[in-house]
Image: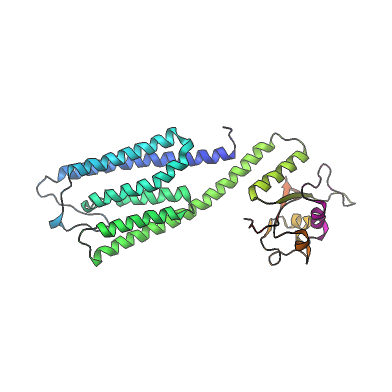
Amino acid sequence: MKLNGTFSLQQEQLDAERQQAIIRLLLTVVTAIVLLKFYTSQVIPGYEVRSTSPLPTAPPDVLPKLALPDVIAIIALFSVYSLGMWVAVRFFPRVLRITNILSSFIEILLITYLLSTAGWTGIPFYLWYIFYVVTVATRYGSLRSILALGASVVSFALIAGAPQNTASDLVPVLGFMGFLLVLALMFGQISEKQLNYRASLAVVNEFRAELAGMITPKDIIDHLLLSVGKLLNVEQTFFLPARRGSDGSEAPGLRSAGANSALMATFREGGGEWNVEQILEQERPLVSNSLSVYHPLPKGIASRLGLRNLAAAPLIVRGAPVGGVYAANGREKRLN
């Protein structure tokens, strides 16, 4: 696989999953140690459970015994799952997407089973929930439906499975669920912004690598228009160079490219604030998803050209404006 921007983004995501797999293994080891320690401590006379968990626990006089089969089952399930995740992200990176989807559902079920079996011990197993929420949020960003599903399963299991539920028990449970949801939304929004930013950087890096093998301005402009069209999924892309000569001629080596002559002529002279010279003077992109309201074209031009949304950006090379790149749609599809 070539080392382009897309590969770099995938590799970064894979590295993050590998780090999380190692953390998951460490949490599994710690969980196994504390469970074994608790099981062996049950036989000590005078041993008393002191809860540090915000979740409800049973009163001391009705505490059950932690059975050895339950301890073995919990340790075995978490060990198999954690090792399986480490092996999957380490040796089978091509199926990372499927692995993450399955993990998002399996992990919340395992954690819920852990709490329903040993939550009464007072051991802070809720740390697994925090790890789960952060992990899924950093994976999917805006796909909060999986987080909502996980939080729903957790809240139902906690409230329904808590021993001797009372009104006072529900307060910390609901408070903890609120904390998880806030954590999920916070990390989801942060992750979404980071993923979008990294995806944009990947596109730029890949485009820059492809440009390195091109020599003529025509090849560069043609490739630029092709990349913009794919990136924005628009019907038309075109380039208008800045005027350079005293007679209004185009810069040497640069020619208008893309679209039809009527469209390019409009944005050379009759496009109002969309004229290429205006775009270059402002030195900032211009986007409109409703040309009749926001940054409108002169009256009648949008309907005559069949345009519904439009974007334009100045092309600046080494501090000098060389032209404007345009992307246009005649269908109802927003430009972002």
Foreground residue among 315 and 298 = 298
Considering depth in this image, is 136 or 323 the residue closer to the camera? Answer: 136
Q: Residue 88: percent from the left, percent from the top?
A: 41, 36
Frontmost residue, 290 versus 24:
290
x, y percent for residue 324: 75, 51
Q: Main secondary structure of the magenta part?
A: loop
Bounds of the magenta span? 247-271
Displayed quadrant of residue 20: top left
Q: Nearer the viewer, residue 13 or 84?
A: 84
Residue 266 lies within the magenta run? yes
Q: Residue at x 78, y 58 (%)?
A: 275
Q: Report the quarter where the C terminus lies.
A: bottom right
Report whether 282 appears left or right of 53.
right
Question: Picture coordinates of residue 222 (x, y %)?
Answer: 74, 42
Q: Residue at x 33, y 55 (%)?
A: 154
Specify whether 107 is left or right of 39: right
Q: Residue furthest right?
A: 247
Quarter of the N terminus within the rendering: top right
